[in-house]
Amino acid sequence: MQYTLLILLLPLLSFIVLGLVDSKWKPKVAGTIGTVVLTIITVLSYFTAFEYFTTARLDGVYQKIIPFHMEWLRFTEYLHIDLGILLDPISVMMLVVITTISLMVNIYSLGYMKNEKGFERYYAFLSLFTFSMLGLVVATNIFQMYIFWELVGVSSYLLIGFYYTKPSAVAAAKKAFIVTRFADLGFLIGILILSFYTKTFDFGILTSANPAVFSGFAGVTFLRFSALSWAMALIFIGGAGKSAMFPLQIWLPDAMEGPTPVSALIHAATMVVAGVFLVARLFPIYVDYTPHVLHGIAYVGAFTSLFAAAIACVQTDIKRVLAFSTISQIGFMMVSLGVSGNGGHEGLGYMASMFHLFNHAMFKGLLFLGAGSLIHAVHSNEMSHMGGLRKYMPVTHITFLIACLAIAGIPPFSGFFSKDEIMAACYEFSPYMGAFMTFTAGLTAFYMFRLYYGIFWGKEHKHEHTPHESPFAMAFPLVFLATITVFAGFIPFGHFVTSDRANYDIELDNMVAGISVLVALIFIALATFMYRKESDIPKKLAKSFSGLYKAASRRFYIDEVYIFITKKIVFNSISRPLAWFDRNVIDATMNGFASSTQWTSQKIKGVQSGQVQQYAYVFLLGTLLITALILFI
Amino acid sequence: MEAYLGVSLIMFFAGVYGFLSRKSLLMILISIELMLNAADINFVVFNRYLYPGQMEGFFFALFTIAIAACETAVAIAIIINIYRNLTSVEVGELDEMKE
């Protein structure tokens, strides 16, 4: 399966070509190149998936295949950095997800970004992102993953700041980069601790379930927790940063400043699930050696999902609502991984998490592209500027409705199946966790339908010109993703991706499924009651819970807390003294050297007059002096 | 012997004085020749009085004369070029390379 290398190299090539020669070509050419390259690698990925999953299992499990591997940098016997391609069920699944969404976004952008300044640059960055994300998922070792992890962060930064003349976009790009970079510091330290004791970066060895690998950790503890726990927790912090888990979620809502297709690709479907992927990749270590860290992940995920869902209920910017919904859904995936055990029925949560990742990528991509289509039509992100759009934009309306039903967990749409598995896994972990997540799922249904009714129903807003349906390039991805969303639930996912790579037959737990559908329906009905027609119930509710409402709409003041900590505490008590020390001690010493050298040279400059005879005179005197010294001493 | 050395001493310091005080490049060149010739005389004199019957000193003197001739040719070529560029052979004006 050597051809999988092409899946990585082609987007890189397209990035280099588009990035270097962009201005010489017409924008359309750049767009076409990007889209054609993506089409090729999408086909290749599908083919890879087909070949991988049709290869016979060995002892009932899918084998890991490494079609390409090279040693990139060698420092010592143990410390060497390799590059390679690792195919196993989750990475093959991610290949399919990434290329599909990326292709849809490329096609969509042909319409959405038309006549936008920097069109070629946009496509070059999209290619860079696709390359880095694919490199991340097929990484054979944790250091290669880290390299591509950072590359993904850079491309996200570049694309959020695409409208670089807008100060808010620049600020959002910086915020996203700094917050995730801060989290990546934890990731790096975690990698270093882990590889220091195990003497390897390789996933194959790390996840081989061989206790000898971790024997180096024996007896090493820090603050009552073992070094391995610390390493795994720190690695999770990196994942939490990228996946916007509490309290590192602050960058994601602001990242919506980027072009909407970018939000769909990076900040909804692919990059933000990198953290989930990371935990899934290292899952054997988490589950076998540090189950308490894994439970911690579950609690963080559960809290984040409720927290974000609560905020999503009161936001008015449609992209912000979707952003918080993304955070909440990633929380679901984390919970599901966190409550999972290993193998067979125990590993239900793992399978459910991956299934939900797959479905979520599709329907959230669809929601964002739909939102882009709406923004394209009414030139505003605000829900209050929409309303009653269902008559004007039938395609967007239907596809958006399908995605809303999927995310709310209504059968037979894809979200129902994966969410139901997550619920089942949670109930098995503890009834409280199950109930908690069921409530959060209900909130999900509520805020999605609040959004839906606010956009497509309700009072019509006066538009400058009548909103129109989007062009074909934008409508096609919507229909395509909607089709996947309708049918993806029937994929026998347990046959492909499970925690032990063996076969698992999904069985719907009627009890759990019934409860979650019932709860979702109740919350949808509530949303219908409140937002279908114009009414003053929402306002009354907001008034009676004014404190809660205000806190939620200000995102529970987390941003303010961050600003307070960084500006008031870190800047004043650490940065300022450091800056003073740097300026007045270190820089001053260096400047002192420089200025004293300069002063001396100014003084002795006159000696070099350019007069040959003067030099000769000095030379003569010197000779005489030396002669005299030799003679008389 | 002292008389010969006295002559070479006078020639050498005449050359040194000329090198330091003359303004024209040509005169400086002649001063250098004076110093070289003083050294030649020393070779011959020391060979003649300290190692009679041997020839090394004489040959050294001959080599030095040949090298002095080459050196003069090079120096005159340089002086001609300087004159072409600056229309002057005054040594005091040759401080272009200072900066």
Image (cartoon, coloured by chain):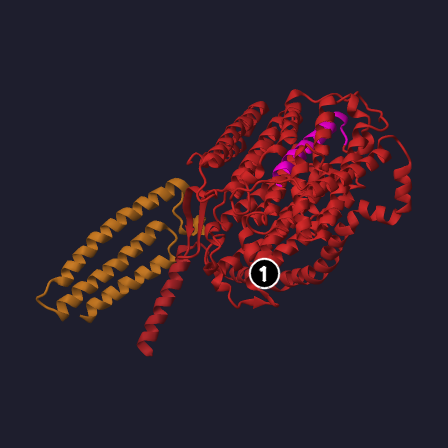
Chain colours: A red, B orange
Under mark 1, the amino acid is: Trp
Q: Is residue A377 magenta?
A: yes
Residue A427 in picture, x, y percent from top left: 69, 49
Residue A164 sits in which quadrant? top right
* Residue A531 vertical position relative to residue B94 in the rendered view, above or below: above
Residue A332 image point, x, y percent: 67, 45
The outermost residue toward the bottom is: A633
Towards the viewer: A264 or A32: A264
Q: Is residue A171 visible?
A: no
Count of numbered marks? 1
Residue at point 87%, 49% (across, down): A547
Alpha-carbon neighbours of circle 1 within 10 Å: few (<14), some, or many (≥20)? Answer: many
The answer to whether residue A283 is visible is: yes
Q: Main secondary structure of the magenta part?
A: helix
Closer to the camera in the image, A399 or A124: A399
- Residue range in magenta is A357-380
Q: Is residue A600 magenta?
A: no
**Residue A318 location (% of width, % of height):** 76, 35
**Residue at image coords 35%, 50%:** B25
Outermost residue toward the left in this view: B53
For the N terminus of chain B, give its image quadrant.
Answer: bottom left
Residue A307 in the image, given as x and y percentages of width and height? 75, 48
Compared across the picture, whether A120 is left or right of A68 comes to right
Q: Is residue A615 left or right of residue A26?
A: left
| Residue depicted at 37% across the width and 63% down the height | A619
Considering only vertical position in the picture, is A556 above or below A363?
below
Q: Secondary structure at mark 1?
A: helix
Report the chain holding disc 1: A
Foreground residue, A531 or A241?
A: A531
| Residue nearest the viewer, comparing A582 with A497 | A497
Q: Residue at x 51, y 31 (%)?
A: A46
Please give the residue where the numbered disc 1 appears in the rendered image: A230
